Image: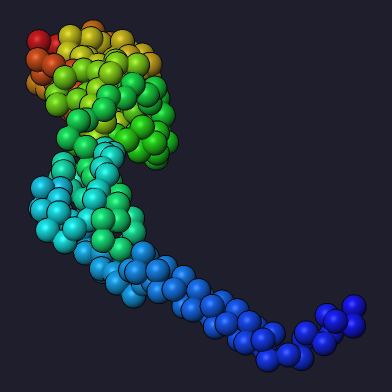
Amino acid sequence: MQNFFKYLVTPDFRKQLLIAIVSIFLLIIMIAVSLRFYTRHGEGLAVPNLKGLNIANAIDILEAEGFSYQIDSVFVVDKKPGTVLEQDPDANTQVKINRIIYLSIVSSLTPDVSFPDIEDKTFREASAILENYGLKVGDTIYKNDIARDAVLAFSLADQGVKIGQKIPKGSRINLVLGDGMGAEQVEVPNLVGLTLSEAMFSIKGASLNLGMVTYEGEVQDTLSAVIVSQNPGVKDSLVKTIMGTKINLVLSNK
């Protein structure tokens, strides 16, 4: 043991220790330089901004700058097919040469969806349902009906569409809605040729009221007089009016 401690203070030991320290230092430097060279430390490229570009143009840019790429597609309504929607990494990110850039583009294939049940739904409900299915509201037409803003009918490009039918996503659906006036309007009965008592019965049954009653010519028997005209009148087709409207009558014995 004494010989070992004596050796530690000899010039030979100090020489060997110095050689070992220098060797370790040189080894560390070599490793650092090698890693720096291997990883190309400090060398990088800024990722170009590809969003909104056509995929062909985006590929030309990536290949010219030494990037690899992978592409997936997704359908988006009202977006031009082949347009770059997203990229990873983001634009201006510093990356190494040959780094893979992931692109999401608008698909040129339009998927189909099953037409949802919107019959008798309110306009607001129908709009929300169509939006959830990736469909849009087209033209809206109001029709006389008791149900206000309720969907009475629907069509796609002026063609009827059935619930569950497969249609292209993004299609515009035209709607026929009720105007809520159905309960307030009634058909005007044709009273010409009826007596006053018969006309009053028809008027009451139609939820209308008797207006002004006048006589044409010399009328000797009002009970047998018949209606020769009315206002509002009925022509070739039925006429509707608001409930409670007064019907003016002209009677005659002729």
**Residue ranking furthest to the front:** 3
Q: Estimate the x, y position of residue 98 in percent, counting from the top left.
A: 26, 56
Q: Out of 121 and 41, give the one closest to the viewer.
A: 41
Residue at left offset 90%, top offset 78%: 1
Residue at left offset 41%, top offset 29%: 121
Q: Out of 222 and 6, give the one closest to the viewer.
A: 6
Q: Out of 192 and 63, give the one closest to the viewer.
A: 63
Residue at left offset 60%, top offset 79%: 20
Q: Is residue 79 left or right of residue 31?
A: left
Does 190 appear above or below 149? above
Residue 111, quarter of the rendered image:
top left
Residue 75, quarter of the rendered image:
top left
Q: In this view, does 226 lie to the left or right of 60?
A: right
Residue 254, quarter of the rendered image:
top left
Q: Estimate the x, y position of residue 82 in percent, counting from the top left.
A: 16, 43
Q: Number of numbered discs present?
A: 0
Is there any visible trace of residue 149 in the rendered image?
A: no
Q: Estimate the x, y position of residue 226 in percent, counting from the top left.
A: 19, 12
